[in-house]
Image: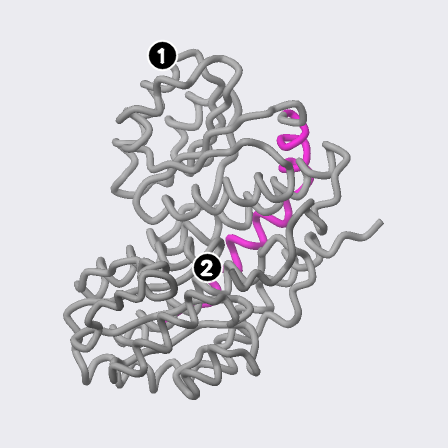
Amino acid sequence: MTYRMIEEIHETPKVIERLISNEGQKIEEIAKIFKRISPDVMIAAGRGTSDNACIYGQYLFESEIGIPVALALGSLYTHYKKTPNLKNGVVMGISQSGETEDVCEILKQSVNQGTFTFGITNHSESTMTKLLGNNTIFMNAGIEKSVAATKTFSASMAGVLLLVYAIKEKKFEIDDLKSMYDEIFDREEEIRNLAQRYSFARDLVIIGTGFNYPVALESALKLKETCYISAQGLSSVDLVHGPLAMLDPDIPVLIFAPDDSTIELSAKVVDRIKETGSHTFIVSDNDELLRKGDLSFKILPSKRELYPFENALFIQLFAFNLSISKGLNPDLPRFLHKVSKI
């Protein structure tokens, strides 16, 4: 049986190439407006996978552009009708379908206030597109039929990354991503074997810090959706501020620990986890840290803002193979639909 999820994961490199080719000029135009406005703050709106892409955007805009980014509180717009003043900032919306109710309402209110508003979506005829017109960046991912978002998560992050690079007038090198993607696709059998080791896991904690915190959140979402595992995505620091108490030898911990400026923190957290007796699975490019794991997967060295693409591809393949090993259909998670307007 051929599954849509694995096919769509494999489409990711081509999706990002199309995004660069087809949206590059529009991204440059949005970047020009952004620089002209020179905002002091940004609001980012998304749900589910798109919310995790927004958190990636938080790290990227705050570190590269130097402005604070807040995640929008959707219920203020849709239920409480207490819309904050958005006039002196910019607003970014991310929605694969372009139809998520509160995201679209946030964008609508922003536009009505005269705030510069842009969005990232996969659908050119969506409500988001009608609201934002030329300020819409299209993922160029094609139809994503699997309920679990894979290629569109990477495309969402890529849209944010390309915009930030354009604002900073930095050149994006697609070859940086290609080499990482090629490496991981070449090791699919290894990932399959690793995933099968967790076939009977009912709980899993996934942690990451900095740029890989949103990947930890997205990883937990993928495992919930496709494997029905009670997975928790946490920042590495948040884990030791309370949730560490729930760990025991029956709860594995997957740690994203790239060899960037967060590596010393990751090493300290791994040591704390090992004191609990929990099984550790470390994804890193640091050999010393990898040796601390009960299981490990070595990734390629990268730039801090590109590690999430590498780790996202890994966890998508891991979740797909774990779902199959559990006898599930990763394309059709129970109770879920591809587009949720709520």
* Residue 180 x/y as whole percent: 51, 53
- Using residue 194 as the reference point, say whether residue 43 is left or right of it: left
Residue appearing at x 19%, y 85% in the figure: 36
Q: Residues within 10 Å of mark 1 (few under 14, many from 20)?
A: few
Please, which colouring scheme is shown? Answer: one colour
User: Which of the pair 225/277 is nearer the observer?
Assistant: 225
Residue 145, percent across and down? Answer: 69, 62
Question: What segment is highlighted magenta in the picture?
Answer: 172-197
Q: Quadrant of residue 261?
A: top left
Looking at the image, is mark 2 or mark 1 earlier in the sequence? Answer: 2
The residue sitting at 50% across, 40% down in the picture is: 220
Residue at horizontal 54 percent and vertical 78 percent from the top: 126
- Secondary structure of residue under mark 2: helix
Say which residue label 2 marks: 50
Which residue is label 1 attached to? 275
At label 2, which amino acid type do we have?
Answer: Ser
Residue 35 in magenta? no
Foreground of the two, 231 or 295: 231
Magenta span contains residue 185: yes
- Compared across the picture, whether 233 is left or right of 238 comes to right
- Name the residue nearer the viewer: 12 or 129: 129
Q: Position of residue 314 (x, y in %)?
A: 55, 45
Q: Residue at x 55, y 50 (%)?
A: 313
